[in-house]
Image (spheres, grey):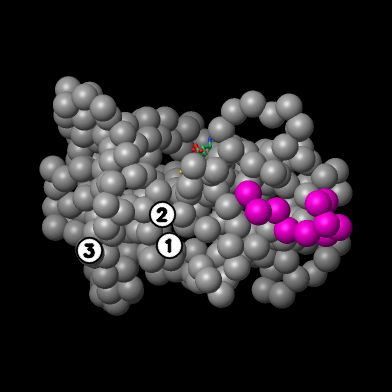
Amino acid sequence: SPWAHRTLIVRNLKGLEDVIGLSVVDHHMTKEGWHFSEPETTPGAILDTVKCVIYVFGSHAAFIKEIYYKANKDFVGRFTVPVLWDKKEQTIVNNESSEIIRMFNSEFNALWKIISLENSSDKPELDFYPMPLRPEIDAINEWIYDQINNGVYKSGFATTQEAYEKNVKILFQALDRVETHLTTGNKHYLIGNQLTEADIRLFTTIVRFDPVYHGHFKCNIKTISHDYPHILKWLRRIYQTPKIADTVNLTHIKAHYYVSHLNINPTAIIGIWNGPVLDFPIIAEEDAKETHA
Ligand SMILES: N[C@@H](CCC(=O)N[C@@H](CS)C(=O)NCC(=O)O)C(=O)O
């Protein structure tokens, strides 16, 4: 999901792979919610590494909801991903991706002084929510969340023609706004010419846009590939940032949406398009040209 994907990216970029464990649910969200599968049957899946559910001592959980119930046996609500689990306290620390990425960004920096991890020297200084840029990041996050990250869901799950048309138009107006924003001054990133959480939060939606939202959620007024050249270039730039491509599993992404939402896609047929070529190599050359111009 785009929400879990954000946390994966910040975990990788901050070099927290050895500090924060990772489990990846099966892409098929059933009536029972998210569940875990063996990587042999579902490539890319990672069994529950927390093993907090003691049916048989130390056994893996089968469903995400077991983890919620372990944290609070009376839990009422949606069993969503991502979930950040505290192995020591045996409970859920947080299940809100926007908060988890902030924790990854700042809460583990002191650790680098205690344990020295490979290539870690620049990680504490890597700041995706730098103080001077916070007002701008907050402002852009707000409308991008409402009109784009959540906008695709509002369009895709609309149950009236009116609601669908209203939301899909707002969505594309917001994409037009991002395109204009990036075009002005030929920006490499949304804010301050550096990679911030605003880029990471938008990236996980844009990388799903043409392959999934365009068909499955009927977000089809335009495409990123053909109608938004600056967003496309920005998408490729982020994708080509070291350690980000590893977090993008298009097979998993497409199978999740087209197969899990049978109310809007009862045949479970997976749309064929994979969207734009993400590792298109022109970016590095273009950036070099721009820098020397
Ligand atoms: N506030 C959460 C939202 C997470 C969320 O909605 N996750 C979806 C991913 S598609 C989910 O797990 N849905 C399962 C359900 O609603 O049953 C965040 O951003 O972390």
For the record, the magenta segment spans 54-63
User: Distance of mark 3 from mark 2, alpha carbons?
Assistant: 15 Å
Q: Amino acid under label 2?
A: His
> What number is the disc on residue 77?
none
Q: Nearer the viewer, residue 58 or 126?
A: 58
Q: Is residue 56 on the magenta stretch?
A: yes
Image-based side of 82 in relation to 270, left or right: right
Q: Mark 1 points at which residue?
A: 252
Q: Name the residue under label 2.
A: 256
Q: Which of 291 and 12 is in front in this view?
A: 12
Q: Where is residue 182 in the image (x, y as percent from the top left)?
A: 27, 48
Instruction: Say how many tags the image has.
Output: 3
Residue sitting at 14 percent across and 57 percent down? 226
Q: Mark 3 points at which residue?
A: 273
Q: Where is residue 174 in the image (x, y as percent from the top left)?
A: 25, 36
- Whether 32 is drawn above or below 118: the answer is above
CB at mark 3 closer than 8 A to ligand 1?
no
